[in-house]
Image: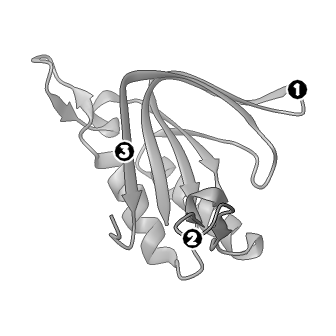
Amino acid sequence: MRAIVQRIERAEVEVDGGLVAKTGPGLLVYLSVGPDDSEDDCHYMADKLTNLRIFEDDRGKMNLSLLDTKGQCLIISNFTLHGDCRKGRRPRFRAAPPEMAEPLYDKVAGLIEQQGVSVQKGVFAAHMDVAAINDGPINLLIDSKRAF
């Protein structure tokens, strides 16, 4: 499982011109499921996202987590994170098929919610218009297989 994690002030998602999700301060997460991912990867990712200390404390140090700040989380499915651009000019996509990926995507969102975080989601496999106001900007890459 791979994720791009952005610390945000706010974000929203539209599909076909209609608002489907909107969130305040917290994290915007683009999430991709790989063909070898399992529920173990879901647990790793949910734990990492909720406990990652990237929010500032009262001294201005990144020392607080999503749980500490009571921030929100917007998760967007994004199979292109499993794109391989090393050869040629057209990426080769090595993401899990949708019938495998969607339940694991939903599992990550559910595990985060179980920890008391307000979670919003985009629409799986839809073309989405995502707007965000980044805070920092702080952007991180996470891979459940620890490839980077």
Badge 3: few (under 14), some or many (20 or more) residues near its Cα, within 10 Å?
few
Distance (Cα) linking label 3 and label 1: 29 Å
Question: In the rendered structure, which amino acid carries the disc numbered 3?
Answer: Leu
Relative depth, front residue between 17 and 85: 85
* Residue 8 on image: x %, y %: 45, 26
Residue furthest bottom in the image = 36
Q: Is residue 57 above or below residue 107?
A: above
Q: Is residue 146 visible?
A: yes
Distance (Cα) linking label 3 and label 2: 24 Å
State the residue at coordinates (65%, 61%).
89
Q: Earlier in the sequence, mark 1 or mark 2?
A: 1
**Mark 2 — residue?**
87
Question: In the rendered structure, which amino acid carries the disc numbered 2?
Answer: Lys
- Colour approach in the figure: one colour
Q: Is residue 66 above or below residue 101?
A: above
Question: In the rendered structure, which amino acid carries the disc numbered 1?
Answer: Gly
Residue furthest front in the image = 88
* Residue 33 on image: x %, y %: 58, 67
State the residue at coordinates (40%, 49%).
115
**Mark 3 — residue?**
140
Report helix, strand or loop for mark 2. Answer: loop
State the residue at coordinates (60%, 79%).
35
* Residue 104 on image: x %, y %: 60, 68
* Residue 63 on image: x %, y %: 16, 34
For residue 44, side relative to residue 78 (left or right): left
**Mark 1 — residue?**
17
State the residue at coordinates (66%, 70%).
92
Q: Earlier in the sequence, mark 3 or mark 2?
A: 2
Report helix, strand or loop for mark 1. Answer: loop
For residue 134, side relative to residue 30 (left or right): left
Badge 2: few (under 14), some or many (20 or more) residues near its Cα, within 10 Å?
few
Q: Is residue 135 above or below residue 72?
A: above
